Amino acid sequence: MQKVRIATRASNLALWQAHYIRDKIKNNFPGIEVEIIKITSKGDRVLDKPLALIGGKGHFTKELEDEMLAGNADLAVHSLKDLPVTIPKGLKLAAVTKRQDVRDLFLSYRYKNLQDLPQGAVVGTTSLRRRMQLLRIRPDLNVKSLRGNVNTRLEKLKRGEFDAIILAYIGMKRLDLIKEVPFSDPISIDLMLPPMGQAALGIEIVDGSSELEKIARSLNDDESEFCAKIERDFVRTLGGSCSVPIAVHATIIDSNVNLKAIVGLPDGSSVIEDEVSVAKADGFKIGVEMAQRMISKGALKLLKKAEEMAFKDERCERF
């Protein structure tokens, strides 16, 4: 294989990720030319609606997948948290890069952390998962939708539209933007669990090429891939239509796998949580088993109600 074409979103963070993977490929396979193809996804274009109302995070990946299926690209680099659990026929999730810091990040020009926020403070996030956990901790907060790329969100914070915003720590770190905001505080996962796949990159390829798969697999981290599969199995078993409040985090500690998860209503008024630790040899099935256990506790009814609350005034657009 002489050339690899990488499809990526055109945002600064997505381009950072694509260049990072490009450099890894060129290092592992010096004779291969790597081309980056920039694509503006619907998730990046439609900024006047909450993300859930335009079909959830899948709108960040669909156009990239379409380019691959049309033969215009060989692989796509995704924030793994944005990649739906169902992969289109003809494509394959071939690798998961080493996961880094999964925490969410509190950012403000006036307040040091969540606890420092006054009653009724306006907090920006587009994530129903974050909204659920924020309002569970601080039901007095006024949580408002925050769309746009990282720089757009930071500009809205600087203009005073929000008292604080919540972003993924890893995105801010990769773009070296944390220093731009006076107050930043990583939020403990004990307070705010991440979404599936947070802080790892997913390498999706056109299926059927052993050469392309070899290139992608050179980027893989086995432990991160194992944990990502558990998390994606959990979300896949729970189902859900467009975007619902689900947080799940798998970790490997010594010879055990630990899995924590929470689902609930967007206002945090009702949640179902679970945690389990098993031997690593048995860990491949715990994502499905935990989801089934939470279903027996009423998770599907709760998520259905969560969707109705999220889409009370509008219905989400589907592919």
Image (cartoon, rainbow, N blue to C red):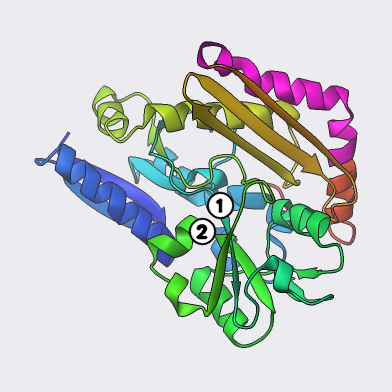
Q: How many marks?
A: 2
Considering only vertical position in the picture, is 88 above or below 34? above
Q: Which residues are magenta?
A: 280-303
Where is residue 305 shown, x and y percent of the image? 90, 44
Q: What is the secondary structure assignment of the residue under circle 1?
A: loop
Q: Which mark is residue 141?
A: none
Which quadrant of the view contains residue 205?
top left
- Foreground residue, 175 or 105? 105
Q: What is the secondary structure assignment of the residue under circle 2?
A: helix
Considering only vertical position in the picture, is 222 above or below 108? above
Whichever of labels 1 and 2 marks the residue nearer the N terminus, that label is 1
The quarter in which the N terminus is drawn is top left
Q: Which residue bears the numbered disc 2?
A: 169
Asked whether residue 257 is drawn in magenta, I would say no
What's the CA distance linking mark 1 and mark 2? 6 Å
Q: Which residue bears the numbered disc 1?
A: 103
- Foreground residue, 227 or 182? 182
For the residues labelled 1 and 2, say whether their Cβ atoms are less than 8 Å apart.
Answer: yes
